[in-house]
Amino acid sequence: MPFRTVRQLSALGAMGGAVNAALAFTGVPILGGATHFEWHIILAGACHGALLAGIAGATAALLQAQPLWQRWLAAPVVGWVAGWLSWVPMQLSIHSRGVLGTLSWPFADSLSQALIGPLRSFGLVSLLLYGGLALSWWGAIMSRPVGLSLGVISGVAGSLWFWCGVGSWPAALIHGAIWGALVGFGLWRSQEAAR
């Protein structure tokens, strides 16, 4: 996968994250109740969406020549790292824990929180996207339906755990589909350009 594709996925992931955060900022109900966010949630959402797509894409590009078993082993690491790093800008916008407290957020509670917290906090989105890129379809020409499906499935299924945890599972459909459709469009466009 060329670097141009990773940049494109990151940019479209940022756009999807910004749109989703703008929906939250403007008061579209997402958490099952009234939640107030500051304007910078939109910037945090853009960083969040870019990191989810970019980490998955960059890792798939770096490992594309490696044996399948090595790519499989990387999948949970990709999900964990993407969930950890992508949640940092969101926490900086929403909470006031300081930079050190925000960076160490997975380790604030327990060992189980450290292991699954980043996966639950949208890391599964990147894990699923990386899985589709690195383990299955990349290298073959990706049609528009396959690219869009991979993006939307990654966005919706990957965020469902988080949204169920905050009591608003329909938000996974809305936010996951917005982010996933943009990233999936980028996958399809990158393959069209490679032909």
Image (spheres, rainbow, N blue to C red):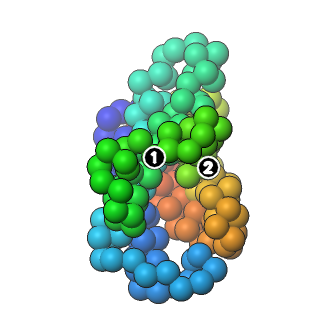
In the foreground, 166 or 66: 166
Quadrant where the C terminus lies? top left
Q: Is residue 162 left or right of residue 22?
A: right
- Identify the residue shown where x is 48% and y is 30%: 60
Residue drawn at x 64%, y 15% is 69
Q: Which quadrant of the structure image shows residue 18?
A: bottom left
**Looking at numbered disc 1 in the image, what kind of residue is underneath it?**
Trp
Q: Is residue 66 found left or right of 37 in the rendered image?
A: right
Residue at the farthest front position:
109
Q: What is the quadrant of residue 76 in the picture?
A: top right
In percent of the image, x 61 and y 35: which residue is there?
111
Residue 189 at x, y = what percent? 43, 51
Which amino acid does the dot numbered 2 rest on?
A: Arg
Left/right placement of residue 109 relative to residue 11 reads: right
Q: Please indicate, yes or no, whether residue 137 appears anywhere in the rendered image.
A: no
Q: Residues within 10 Å of mark 2 (few under 14, many from 20)?
A: many
The secondary element bearing badge 2 is classed as helix
At x 40%, y 34%, the residue is: 58
Please name whichever residue, 121 or 2, is drawn nearer the observer in this view of the structure: 121
- Give the percent coordinates (x, y) of residue 48: 40, 55
User: In x, y percent, where is residue 37?
Assistant: 39, 77
State the mark number for residue 105: 1
- Name the one closer to the observer, 7 or 74: 74
Mark 2 and mark 1 in contact? Answer it, CB < 8 Å: no
Marks 2/1: CA–CA distance: 13 Å
33 to 40, vertically: above or below? below
**Element class at badge 1:** helix
Mark 2 and mark 1 lie on one chain; the one further toward the N terminus is: 1
Task: Find residue 72 and report its image quarter.
Answer: top right
- Counting from the top left corner in percent of width and height, residue 188 is at 49, 50
Q: Which mark is residue 120?
A: 2
Dot label at residue 116:
none
